[in-house]
Image (cartoon, rainbow, N blue to C red):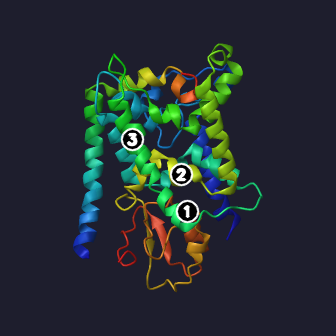
Amino acid sequence: MKYAQRLQSHMKYGILTISIAFILVGIIREEHLEVMKKAAKICLECIGVG
Amino acid sequence: MSIKEVMIRPIIQMVATVATNWHLSNFLKGTIYKGKTKTVCVPGLNCYSCPGAAGSCPIGSLQAVIGGTKYNISYYIMGMVMLFGTLFGRLICGFLCPFGFIQDLLYKIKIPKLKVPQKIDKILRWLKYVILVVFVILLPILLTNEFGMGNPYFCQLICPAGTLEGGVPLLIKNESLRSGLGLLFTWKAILLVIFILASVFIYRPFCKYICPLGAIYSLFNKFSFYQINLDELKCNSCKTCERKCKMNVEITKNINSLECIRCGECKRTCKQGAITSGFKIKPNHIAEK
């Protein structure tokens, strides 16, 4: 049980590190600009028009 | 239970909803905010076509990026959702999600409530994972047009948040958008009415059965920094907490269940003080045996 507890504790730090790494990779790949391109226009599909 | 204890969650929910949609003047103009903060995702489900939206919807953004021609996978959105999930788990559903707050308000309407039979409820809970995989991930990648672009199928065909937060205020103020109304809007309006009515009678039906963002965050409940703990030595198994839980979580069996939105109702009702929550709490394993 203690092993599982330790694993769980390490896992959250691991996932946190991976998530920050993913965000940085996404920024380097300029994915945030793709998000901006979509979010800066009215999404016709979202509001039920397009 | 003190007034402070009862009121703290709705106040946080209200502040989070306003902070997520703080460009309020756009509701009067019938347009949306187009500034740089929209490159960042908000933690909750909030349509980026809501006139006041200050950030992007994680689910809408995920579909936009993977359904575009440039990328098949979105590290940026995945990273952001993982970051929110690792820190908070479904605490976001309980405290920070604007659409969750709307459902909470609807459920406060004093009218006899419905209880979904346990068997049906258990099956329906899996629906949100199916919707996540099929409508948010697979369809935008696989069902593309001649330019290789996929539609945001979840937003287009299912999401009532987009209709309510974006569609209704924009269509009221914007005549050119109104001229484009058709069958799709009729479908989405019917869905919205169904969800609104369902939310009056059933606690958070969208969160329980449909929300793909809740489905993602649920996977982090056991690993998130924010944890809820049940002290087995203090618990007298009266199960008051389970009877009070509107998400129908079997608290004494699995306190960090996939379905727990961390609203804290169990903690407030436990007279033994057996339930604790916070960022410095070690995950409970005794109760999850």
Give residue B288's position: percent from left, percent from top.
Answer: 38, 74
Determine contact: label 3, label 2, CB under 8 Å: no
Determine contact: label 2, label 1, CB under 8 Å: yes
* Earlier-in-chain disc, 2 versus 1: 2
Q: Nearer the viewer, mark 3 or mark 2?
A: 3
Instruction: Give the distance between the C-alpha atoms of the residues marked 1 and 3, in whole angstroms.
Output: 24 Å
- The numbered mark 1 sits on a residue in which chain? B
What's the amino acid at mark 3? Val
Q: What's the mark number on residue B134?
A: 3
Label 1 Cα neighbours within 10 Å, binned few <14 / some 14-19 / many ≥20: some
- The numbered mark 3 sits on a residue in which chain? B
Identify the residue at image location x=64%, y=57%. B202
Which of B255 and A11 lies nearest the eye of the viewer?
Answer: B255
- Judging by the rendered image, the residue that carries numbered circle 1 is B247
| Mark 1: secondary structure | loop
Q: What's the mark number on residue B207?
A: 2
| Mark 3: secondary structure | helix
* Earlier-in-chain disc, 1 versus 3: 3
Identify the residue at image location x=65%, y=37%. B190
Quarter-of-image position of residue B272: bottom right
Quarter of the rendering occupied by the C terminus of chain B: bottom left
Against B167, is B87 above or below? below
Left or right: B78, with B119 as reference point: left
